[in-house]
Image: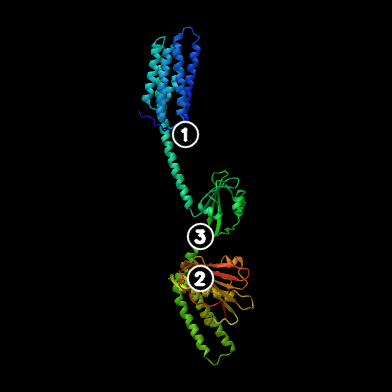
Amino acid sequence: MPTRQIKTVHDHSLRAEIRLYALYRMLEAVTLLAMIILYASAEEVMRSTLLYAVPACLIYLLVATTFIALAYTRISASRQIVLGTVFDLIFAGLLAWLIPQAADVIGPMLMLNVVAAALLVSLPFGLSIAVVAGTGLMLLSPRGWNDHLPYALIYIAIALVASRLGQKISQSDQVTEQQSLEIAELSRMNSLILERLPVGVLVVNGKGRIRTSNEVAQYLLRLDSSLPDEEILDLRSPPLARKLQRWIEGKPQDQELLAFRHHEARIEPQFLRLIPQGEEILIFLNDTSQAARRAETMTLATLGRFSASLAHEIRNPLSAINYAAQLLEESQSLDYMDRKMLDIIRQQVRRTNGIINSVLGLARRAPAQPQRFDLCQMVRNFADEYRIGFPLDNDTLTLRIPDEALMANADPDHVHQILMVLISNARYYGRMPDEPAHMTLRVAQEGNRCMVDVIDRGPGISDGAARSLFKPFYTTSSHGTGLGLYIARELAQNNRGDLEYLRRSSGSCFRLSMPLASAEPEMPGSAPQAVQ
């Protein structure tokens, strides 16, 4: 019959069992000592026997105390049980031999020792203890061996039953341990999945305290995962706490998304109770901006493929219309209104052609080819070209460029295209009504980045418009396509840079940043100048 596997004493549950067994041994020793004292006044007990029984009982008491101390160590549990049970039999037999009348007390006491041997060690060891204990009682009985025969039979029966119970407990322990391992593995897997989720996850108790959170939620709410104390949701995100309270009260939720100052995400919270009628609530923080960006990417890709095939069909009749308008201009019989209509035709042809070029830019955007160039000189050349191609008239373009060279690592053609978009917007939209436009190109270095700021002194941009500036097809003008700033930012990011809007007290500022290359020897530059 298989034996039960015993764990070391540092196991919490088995440590308690060993300690109880050691305390029972102490109780046996104290009981035997008290029994000897009671028998000392009996005439049938020889005085000489007491001289040996009392020291033996005191030694047994000392041994029992030692086993109590061993129960708090890491010594093998099976060794403690085997040694303790053997000592119990030795001292029980010795005292039964010295005082045969004590056998009636020792017999019942040894039942628990037999149970412990068979339950916690093995059936062979338990049967051995049962046979030895029963045989000893029968041999030492003053009334004959058959007087304690029932004890011997009871010991054997107890050993069999306890061993069977031990097997059941061992099997149950193995199943429990296996299930514990599986639960721990599932817990680790769930924790890993929770941390890798792109969705923020929070668990909040009934008092509004955050019990646990994943990395996304910690970033969105700026939680400190190193703090052991639970943080209060209302202090981290009052709007989220208000939505949670409305959900708890059963009120309908508004459709407003949550926004965080340090992040562009637009969060849609979802609430769920972990346990029906329980206090703990699971909160999912879904970033709807990610889905919007994916939908936007798919839309732009579809638009790009469609526009590439459509552009040729549109440009052919557009070129014919433009050519026909040029021929009509050569006619001498046109009056003032006819020429006015021709100007409108040419203006709309140019506008339509510009829309086609902007849409085609989405489809056939050339990959960036970064190279090392002097950003200061490039901006100077751009200003000269713009002045020639687009006369400023009463408008002004001021350059604030350092004298020394500033070497950038980007695609010069892309930078030129971005500056053209920004200057055009600043000139036509960044001016006060009925006043000339005042534009500034400022070049600077910050750390390992170089920057070009395009500044105007116009009416500025409202908060609502600023949030949608770089979205495709967003425009506040009836003549714009809403693609200029979007394409400009895409070009900047393709060059490992960025394009952002900076709020000013008056006017607007768009900052183009790009990687900085190693500097070359200084090149002569010019002081800040105004180009008109």
Q: Which mark is residue 290?
A: 3
Give the spatial CA distance, label 2 vs label 3.
21 Å
* SS type, badge 1: helix
Q: Amino acid at mark 3?
A: Gln
Which residue does the numbered mark 2 point to in the structure image? Answer: 488
Q: Earlier in the sequence, mark 2 or mark 3?
A: 3
**Disc 1 + disc 3, Cβ < 8 Å:** no
* SS type, badge 2: helix
Which residue does the numbered mark 1 point to in the structure image? Answer: 12
The C terminus: image quadrant: bottom right
Counting from the top left corner in percent of width and height, residue 472 is at 52, 68
Q: Earlier in the sequence, mark 2 or mark 1?
A: 1
Foreground residue among 304 and 376? 376
Can you tell which of label 2 and label 1 is closer to the viewer? 1
Q: Residue furthest bottom?
A: 332
Residue drawn where x is 51% and y is 62% of the image = 292
Q: Residues within 10 Å of mark 2 (few under 14, many from 20)?
A: many
Give the spatial CA distance, label 1 vs label 3.
49 Å
User: Would you say 124 lies left or right of 104 here?
Assistant: left
* SS type, badge 3: helix
Residue drawn where x is 59% and y is 79% of the image = 395
58, above or below 7, in the image: above
Q: Amino acid at mark 2?
A: Ala
